[in-house]
Image (cartoon, rainbow, N blue to C red):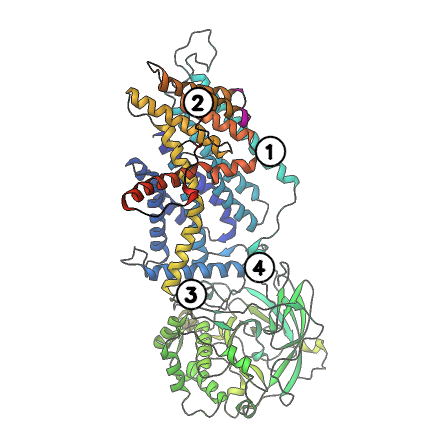
């Protein structure tokens, strides 16, 4: 294998080893296999491009294009042109997946599930870092700057991950970078000629040394290994004495961090991600248990949060301001004193493995006593964990209201306040017309909003021929709602989201609540809530009653009594009854998942849900122009600042790597190219060239201003002497080793400069202005020919700067 082939393999391995640091973030880890395969294809394109050979920038552009195609095939094949080419629909799908992935990151605890959005972020990030590493280290033969994207990859993972195994991921990433540096060093040494330790040596010679220089050539490799081992050891030991980073973005913003024992944690209930993987769990693990003195435990839903925004792609919760939890929560919005209300007391114990940021509460709660750091969101009446607080192992007492409206009160509900009506009846323009048309047909003949709501509920639960099916695609956007109305099969999120959307088209304020159905009664009088009891249901607003629960999903939960014809509201237990009496067994209908026959359970007809919410958006919602504009802006932001650096790296490689031709003219061109590289390197470090000086005087000036050490100073003078030879000697004798002298000068200038100056020389080299000078020269020729206006002053080359 050639030196550049080894370097490409090292770049691939370094990227993959650094990517392993993200393994603790997501479960399962199968995404890394996909990323490794796509990364191998991308690196293979680079190998082929360099072998052709293509220009360096064109090679990088080809790899970038292949990266986009690979991501399109992997994540947006159905929307792609011919299943491969990234057309507008495919780009829109990728943007929507990235948006959903960003939302998932903010909702899930570590380890988060590998949702399509998160998987795209991981795989795309690995490919982007791999592209940068391969371009810098292999295409431009500069492995040192390639450590920056590797460091960025590890830093993101280290900032998010938690646990004591962080040193292992650092070790892998560091070894990958050292491997890359070692491969580059061997590649550079191989350019000097054949390196060997000498097979046949005199008996008196020292082992491993070769008077021809082979041993000296191997010495830098051995020294580099020792330095790398010492640096790696220090980097591993020093952080042990420093404070560790806590939690991270996923743990802080999502559903709690932490890892549970014995089987891990239960994923946080995320209303923006697919439920489908959880709906068919083989084991109905308990997430919490409770005791209550409610007279109708079948209506005792534990609510987590409400989704009140529908943008056409998904339902999601609004971002609202939090406040301290008051001793007594404010009265529910819209509830009139004329509506019968009973107070209920309940005690809830959450499983240690159930770690959720939102505290499950009966709605509407009026008082909550819970330990830990919690905040109150008034609009949704939810409690949110602060600073990583979760429900894991929490025990709390809740006082809530059992609101008992009559059908007559609901039918005579007053006018909804304008602000509330405007916010909760918004529907996106992308909502298909069939939704509003079906809502009008179903509610035809209804006299008021209450009758319309009941007709919608009955249409889904009994009259419309809908079937509960967990195998249906869990999309929740506008197109998914239209598909659900056509196919008439789905699970709780389809029923809840579709009814809420249809209610909004009828002018009824609506939102979607997520949480748990009442669970199963136990012999000791408590109730057990399992993973399969998670649920989603619509809440509709009626002035005088407030937000009111409806149940459109067949075989799930319980239909509210106020939606049944001529149904009594029932009495509530005496709220003053001691809580010890509340622990007595209460007759209640078991949850659908427990009472359903085995055959129906196999067919997915039973209520077996695990985590309420909607899938990552699958239907198009972002305009094509916006997508293309964002993509163009991202490309400009990423590439434009790096163009001077890429031009400079290419120019250096061309000047120092030139070896073609053996005529005196070719030797003169190579020598002058090296001198140009030396002067440009000095210019990048703040020493502008002066064309009025002879090469010897220019070398003295460079040594003085650059504060070069002896080795670098000698290298400058050797290059200057070679320039004088090819320019002024009667019989020029080209010198050898000038490229290594130029590298020694660059090393000396970097050592004498500070860190800001070195970064400036790398990222914003001053000598890149030569590109503007070249364009200006061409423009001068064109202006003389076509009489164009004078060029800007900044593009004109100063008289004392070398061209």
Region in magenta? 704-710
| Residue 708 image-quadrant placement | top right
Q: Is the residue 124 above or below the residue 182 in the image?
A: below
Estimate the spatial distance between the alpha carbons at disc 2 and disc 4, rounded to whole Å.
64 Å
Q: Which residue is mark 1?
A: 234
Q: Which residue is mark 2?
A: 694
Label 2's element? loop
Residue 253 — which label?
Answer: 4
Estimate the spatial distance between the alpha carbons at disc 3 and disc 1, rounded to whole Å.
47 Å
* Marked residue nearer the N-terminal end (1 or 4): 1
* Marked residue nearer the N-terminal end (2 or 3): 3
Camera-side residue of 237 and 642: 642
- Measuring 45% from the left and 17% from the top, which residue is drawn there? 215
Tag 3: Cα neighbours inside 10 Å, few (<14), some, or many (≥20)? Answer: many
Tag 2: Cα neighbours inside 10 Å, few (<14), some, or many (≥20)? Answer: few
Q: Position of residue 283 (x, y in %)?
A: 50, 63
Estimate the spatial distance between the alpha carbons at disc 1 and disc 4, rounded to whole Å.
33 Å
* Marked residue nearer the N-terminal end (2 or 4): 4
* Marked residue nearer the N-terminal end (3 or 4): 4
| In the image, residue 388 lies in the stretch drawn in magenta | no
Pointers 3 and 1 in contact (C-beta within 8 Å): no
Q: Position of residue 101 (x, y in %)?
A: 47, 59
Q: Which residue is mark 3?
A: 617
| In the image, residue 708 lies in the stretch drawn in magenta | yes
Estimate the spatial distance between the alpha carbons at disc 3 and disc 4, rounded to whole Å.
21 Å
Residue 325 — which label?
Answer: none
- Measuring 36% from the left and 79% from the top, which residue is drawn there? 434
Q: Quadrant of the N terminus?
A: top left
Pointers 1 and 2 in contact (C-beta within 8 Å): no
Pointers 3 and 4 in contact (C-beta within 8 Å): no
**Residue 762 seen anywhere in this rendered image of the structure:** yes
Camera-side residue of 715 and 322: 715
């Amino acid at each position: 294998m050639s030196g550049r082939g080894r370097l490409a393999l090292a770049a691939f391995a370094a990227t993959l080893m650094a990517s392993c640091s993200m393994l603790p973030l997501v479960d399962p880890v199968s995404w890394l296999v996909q990323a490794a395969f796509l990364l191998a294809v991308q690196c293979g394109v680079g190998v082929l491009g360099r072998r052709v050979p293509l220009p360096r920038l064109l090679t990088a552009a080809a790899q970038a294009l292949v990266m986009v195609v690979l991501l399109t095939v992997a994540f947006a094949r159905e929307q792609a042109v011919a299943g491969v080419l990234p057309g507008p629909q495919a780009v829109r799908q990728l943007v929507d997946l990235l948006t959903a992935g960003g939302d998932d990151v903010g909702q899930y605890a570590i380890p988060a599930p590998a949702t399509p959005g998160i998987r795209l972020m991981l795989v795309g990030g690995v490919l982007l870092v791999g592209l940068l590493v391969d371009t810098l280290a292999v295409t431009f033969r500069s492995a040192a700057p390639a450590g920056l994207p590797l460091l960025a990859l590890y830093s993101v993972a280290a900032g998010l991950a938690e646990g004591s195994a962080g040193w292992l991921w650092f070790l892998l990433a560091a070894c990958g970078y050292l491997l890359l540096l070692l491969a580059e060093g061997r590649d550079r040494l191989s350019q000097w000629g054949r390196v060997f330790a000498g097979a046949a040596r005199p008996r008196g010679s020292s082992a491993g040394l070769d008077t021809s220089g082979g041993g000296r050539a191997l010495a830098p490799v051995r020294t580099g290994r020792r330095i790398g081992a010492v640096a790696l050891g220090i980097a591993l030991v020093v952080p042990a004495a420093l404070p560790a980073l806590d939690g991270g973005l996923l743990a802080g913003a999502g559903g709690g961090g932490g890892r549970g024992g014995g089987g891990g944690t239960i994923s946080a209930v995320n209303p923006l991600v697919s439920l489908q993987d959880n709906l068919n769990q083989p084991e109905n693990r308990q997430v919490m248990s409770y005791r209550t003195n409610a007279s109708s435990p079948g209506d005792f839903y534990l609510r987590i949060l409400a989704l009140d925004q529908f943008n056409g792609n998904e339902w999601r919760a609004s971002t609202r301001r939090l406040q301290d939890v008051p001793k007594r929560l404010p009265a529910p919005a819209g509830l009139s004193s004329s509506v019968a209300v009973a107070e209920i007391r309940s005690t809830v114990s959450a499983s240690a493995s159930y770690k959720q940021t939102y505290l499950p509460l009966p709605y509407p709660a009026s008082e909550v006593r819970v330990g830990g750091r919690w905040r109150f969101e008034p609009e949704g009446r939810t409690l949110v964990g602060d600073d990583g607080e979760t429900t894991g192992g929490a025990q709390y007492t809740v006082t809530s209201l059992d609101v008992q409206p009559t059908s007559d009160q609901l039918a005579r509900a007053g006018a909804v306040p304008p602000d509330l009506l405007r916010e909760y009846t918004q529907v996106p323009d992308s909502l298909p017309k069939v939704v509003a048309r079906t809502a009008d047909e179903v509610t035809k003949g209804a006299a008021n909003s209450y009758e319309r709501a009941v007709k919608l509920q009955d249409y889904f639960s009994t009259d419309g021929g809908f079937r509960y099916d967990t195998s249906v695609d869990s999309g929740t956007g506008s197109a998914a709602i239209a598909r659900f109305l056509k196919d008439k099969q789905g699970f709780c999120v389809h029923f809840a989201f579709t009814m809420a959307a249809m209610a909004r088209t009828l002018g009824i304020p609506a939102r979607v609540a997520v949480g748990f159905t009442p669970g199963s009664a136990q012999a000791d009088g408590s109730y057990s809530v399992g993973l399969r009891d998670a649920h989603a249901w619509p809440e509709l607003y009626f002035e005088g009653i407030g937000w009111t629960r409806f149940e459109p999903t067949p075989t799930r939960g319980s239909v509210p009594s106020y939606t049944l014809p001529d149904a009594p509201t029932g009495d509530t237990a005496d709220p003053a009854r001691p809580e010890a009496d509340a622990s007595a067994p209460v007759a209640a209908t078991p949850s659908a998942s427990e009472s359903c026959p085995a055959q129906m359970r196999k067919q997915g007809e039973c209520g077996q849900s695990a985590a309420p919410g909607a899938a990552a958006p699958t239907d198009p919602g972002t305009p094509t122009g916006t997508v293309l504009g964002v993509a163009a802006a991202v490309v400009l932001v990423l590439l434009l600042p790096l163009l001077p650096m890429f031009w400079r790296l290419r120019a250096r490689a061309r000047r120092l790597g030139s070896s073609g031709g053996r005529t005196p003219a070719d030797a003169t061109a190579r020598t002058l190219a090296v001198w140009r590289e030396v002067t440009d390197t000095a210019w990048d470090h703040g020493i502008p060239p002066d064309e009025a000086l002879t090469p010897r005087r220019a070398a003295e000036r460079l040594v003085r201003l650059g504060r070069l050490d002896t080795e670098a100073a000698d290298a400058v003078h050797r290059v200057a002497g070679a320039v004088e030879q090819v320019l002024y000697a009667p019989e020029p004798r080209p010198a050898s080793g000038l490229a290594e002298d130029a590298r020694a000068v660059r090393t000396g200038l970097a050592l004498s400069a500070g860190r800001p100056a070195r970064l400036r020389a790398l990222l914003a080299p001053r000598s890149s202005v030569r590109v503007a000078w070249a364009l200006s020269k061409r423009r001068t020729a064109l202006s003389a020919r076509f009489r164009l206006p004078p060029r800007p002053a900044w593009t004109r080359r100063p008289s004392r700067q070398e061209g």
